């Protein structure tokens, strides 16, 4: 059976986590959220968590080698065989290059990249009203994260050329779910 290997990209607040959950239900492949895994590491007080905590509070990127190692361990697990949804990775060119190498080593089929596009004023509004109590959801840190996305992550989209589908991320959660499903043919 063909693999469903997906990367969900888009700025903070674009709805990657929400849409990833729909794909998990529909396709039955796991969501791999580096943000969630890092927050778990912070909560557990592990070495990685201790290194990442202050960086995340500032809205900066955790060092490439740290996240690459986390993703490497996760993608090697058996539940990723039919496919996976990477949410929040890769965020830099170095991460994209490392992912190419890793998928090659694992003999995986090519990835498809879904980019959720949402204007910045809407992103700020969504994040400040979502009330998840995240340490990085204050206005100054959100501005920083949006800048990091623009400078470091958006350029990575080009790395994937024809594999990219851009989706309008404005609308109801269900409308966007249907657009994503249509784009993936699922
Ligand atoms: P959002 O997309 O809303 O910014 P995430 O949960 O994806 O939230 O990420 C939260 C924070 O975790 C980021 O601001 C960054 O500090 C860290 N992080 C997550 N994924 C990565 C990654 N691939 N590379 C570096 N840092 C990451």
Image (spheres, rainbow, N blue to C red):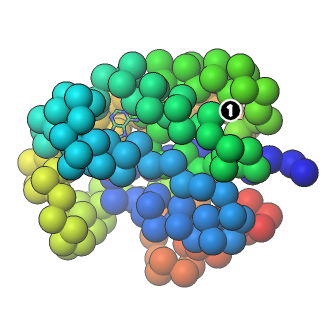
Q: Residue furthest right?
A: 1
Residue 70: tell me if it is visible.
yes
Q: Is residue 44 left or right of residue 103?
A: left
User: Residue at image x 59%, y 45%?
Assistant: 7
Q: Nearer the viewer, residue 119 or 79?
A: 79
The number of numbered badges drawn on the structure is: 1
The answer to whether 156 is drawn above or below residue 171 in the figure is above
Q: Residue 49 appears at what percent x and percent y?
A: 23, 36
Q: Nearer the viewer, residue 173 or 120?
A: 173
- The quarter of the image holding the C terminus is bottom right
Q: Residue 67 appears at what percent x and percent y?
A: 40, 30
The answer to whether 163 is drawn above or below residue 85 in the figure is above
Residue 144: tell me if it is visible.
no
User: Residue at image x 70%, y 39%?
Assistant: 111
The residue beneath circle 1 is 161
Assess mark 1: CB under 8 A from ligand 1?
no
Q: Residue 3 appears at what percent x and percent y?
A: 80, 47
Q: Under tag 1, what secondary structure?
A: helix
The answer to whether 125 is drawn above or below residue 135 in the figure is below
User: Residue at image x 16%, y 51%?
Assistant: 136
Q: Residue 1 appears at what percent x and percent y?
A: 90, 51
The answer to whether 111 is drawn above or below residue 136 in the figure is above
Q: Is residue 39 left or right of residue 112?
A: left
Mark 1 Cα within 10 Å, few/some/many (few <14, many 20+)? Answer: few
The quadrant of the picture showing ligand 1 is: top left
User: Residue at image x 64%, y 18%?
Assistant: 101
């Amino acid at each position: 059976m063909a693999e469903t290997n997906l990367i969900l990209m888009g700025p903070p607040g674009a709805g990657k986590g929400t849409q990833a959950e729909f794909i998990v239900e529909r396709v039955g492949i796991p969501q791999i959220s580096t943000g969630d895994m890092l927050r778990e590491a912070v909560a557990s007080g592990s070495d990685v968590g201790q290194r990442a905590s202050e960086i995340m509070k500032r809205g900066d990127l955790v060092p490439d080698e740290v996240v690459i190692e986390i993703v490497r361990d996760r993608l090697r697990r058996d539940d990723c065989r039919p496919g996976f949804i990477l949410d929040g990775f890769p965020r830099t060119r170095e991460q994209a290059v490392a992912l190419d190498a890793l998928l090659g080593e694992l003999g995986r089929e090519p990835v498809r990249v879904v980019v959720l596009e949402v204007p910045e004023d809407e992103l700020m509004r969504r994040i400040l009203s979502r009330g998840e109590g995240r340490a990085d959801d204050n206005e100054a840190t959100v501005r920083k994260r949006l800048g990091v996305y623009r400078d470091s992550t958006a350029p990575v989209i080009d790395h994937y050329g024809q594999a990219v589908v851009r989706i309008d991320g404005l609308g109801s959660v269900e409308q966007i779910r249907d657009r994503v499903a249509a784009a993936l043919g699922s």
